[in-house]
Amino acid sequence: MTFGRYINADSPVHRIDPRAKLALLLATSIVVVSSKGIVVNVLFLLLLFLVSSCARIGLRQTVKTLLGFSFFFLLTVLFHLVFTREGAVIDFWIFHLGITGFVRGVIYSVRLANLVLASTVFILTTSPVELADGVENLLSPLTRVGLPVRDFSLMLMIAMRFVPTMLEDGRRVYNAQLCRGARFHGGIVKRAGMLTSVIVPLIVMSFYHAETLSYAIVARGYRTFGKRTHLCRPSFGRADTLAVALSITLIILTI
């Protein structure tokens, strides 16, 4: 799992302002979801591979990320292959098999791959602190109507930081149970019963981390409202302005 794991590197993608990257992610999602043909989706997939290479993520890491979602890609193709009535060659009850359903399933799978890859590149190249500051800056006008924007951005940052921690805790608990003689194989019912020996300690450890973190936040004098200082204030440069302009252009062309 690469979600929440920030790659600290110096690349043109890393240097883009998080607000500009959010705009690019939104524009990419709109274009990918709105496009009906396979050509646009394939071109965007190749473009995202190029962007990940510029971000120094590496081709191997990118392919591993997509392979992690291979079950959902296959499920998407299978769902459209079986339940698409248009152009069906074999009709049996609620099942319809045909080349049209297969092509439609491939298109939707490439769409899903684009969304996964775009989100992955954004997460790997944006630190949780930068993301939280960017979201807080974008939603700052909502503080005038009393919405706790700062709390929302803090929760977003904590949630992203907790994902790698929980994965590491789960791995440790799993290995500890294996050392104690647990066997995670057999039938579905047996494996589901054995997973409780991992889930229960993981939930307890998560509550422990949350309680410790809450004490640390209170001890540092955190307040919901009031003036806050920033160590590094986000500022727009030429590349950021170009990214926002490109995002607006893509959205307008899609509409």
Image (cartoon, rainbow, N blue to C red):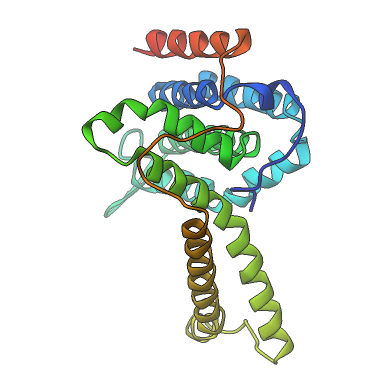
At x 49%, y 30%, the residue is 134
- Residue 148 % position (x, y): 32, 41
At x 55%, y 27%, the residue is 18
Residue 145 versus residue 30 in the image, above or below: below
- Residue 212 % position (x, y): 53, 67
* Residue 97 visible in the picture: no
- Name the one closer to the observer, 209 or 37: 209
Toward the left, the furthest residue is 145
Residue 253 relative to residue 239: left or right: left
- Residue 15 % position (x, y): 67, 23
Residue 60 versus residue 140 in the image, above or below: below
- Quarter of image, res 234: top right
At x 63%, y 26%, the residue is 48
At x 65%, y 45%, the residue is 65
Residue 176 relative to residue 36: left or right: right
- Residue 192 % position (x, y): 49, 80
Q: How many marks?
A: 0
- Name the one closer to the observer, 94 or 137: 137
- Name the one closer to the observer, 96 or 127: 127
- Name the one closer to the observer, 90 or 128: 128
Toward the bottom, the furthest residue is 181
Q: Quadrant of the C terminus?
A: top left
Residue 188 relative to residue 47: left or right: left
